[in-house]
Image (tube, grey):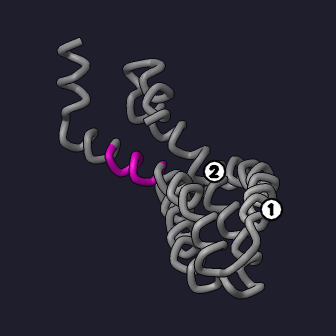
Amino acid sequence: MRAALIELADRGLALRLAALGAIGAMPKLYMMTIALILTQIGGRPASDPGIFFGFVAGAELPSMLLTVHLGRSLARLPLLMLGVALSVVFLLALPILAHNGLVWVLILPLALANGVILTIPITYLHDLLANRPGTGTALVAF
């Protein structure tokens, strides 16, 4: 146990794990705030966040399949940074477009971002912790 904790305390590894934790929190941030932003800022009915969630979830599956395809020709880190950039654009644009009909266009960049953010960290962690089988998958939950 001590050796495992010492290994996880390595500065480079700890920094990468913290960055992946922040990246993994991005979808949770959108899920926690979308209902408030759409209903309070945008003045939309309470059903709109549910409809938005549904469309995003439906678009995430093709996005994940696209991510797998792109992952064969692109390195994981640039692909992950693209997902982060799309997620940041979504999070910044959501309150601005909440009252506008264009808010529905944000479903596409969010689904693309989530497709990357929900798939790439798993393989990244598996490679990062290759000498400890199972650890990468266990850390995805954080």
Where residue 74 appears, as percent x and y from the top left, is 59, 56
Where residue 53 appears, as percent x and y from the top left, is 73, 57
Please state the extent of the stretch shown in magenta in the rendering. Answer: 18-24
The dot on residue 51 is 1
Q: Quadrant of the N terminus?
A: top left
Q: Earlier in the sequence, mark 1 or mark 2?
A: 1
Residue drawn at (65%, 73%), measured in percent from left and top? Answer: 38
Find out whether residue 6 is within the magenta segment. Answer: no
Amino acid type at image mark 2:
Gly
Residue drawn at (60%, 75%), measured in percent from left and top? Answer: 40
Say which of marks 1 and 2 sits in front: 1
Q: How many C-alpha atoms fall within 10 Å of the one at disc 2: few (<14), some, or many (≥20)?
A: some
Q: Give the camera-side residue of 115 and 70.
A: 115
Q: Quadrant of the C terminus?
A: top left
Find out whether residue 23 is within the magenta segment. Answer: yes
Distance from the alpha carbon under mark 1 to that under mark 2: 30 Å
Q: In screen coordinates, is 57 left or right of 1? A: right
Amino acid type at image mark 1:
Ile
Determine contact: label 1, label 2, CB under 8 Å.
no
Q: Quadrant of residue 63?
A: bottom right
Q: In screen coordinates, is 9 left or right of 140? A: left
* Residue at the spot of label 2: 71
Q: Magenta region's main secondary structure?
A: helix
Residue drawn at (68%, 53%), measured in percent from left and top? Answer: 67
Where residue 87 appears, as percent x and y from the top left, is 55, 66
The dot on residue 96 is none
The secondary structure type at the circle numbered 1 is helix
Q: Quadrant of residue 39?
A: bottom right
Q: Quadrant of residue 106?
A: bottom right
Residue drawn at (18%, 41%), measured in percent from left and top? Answer: 11
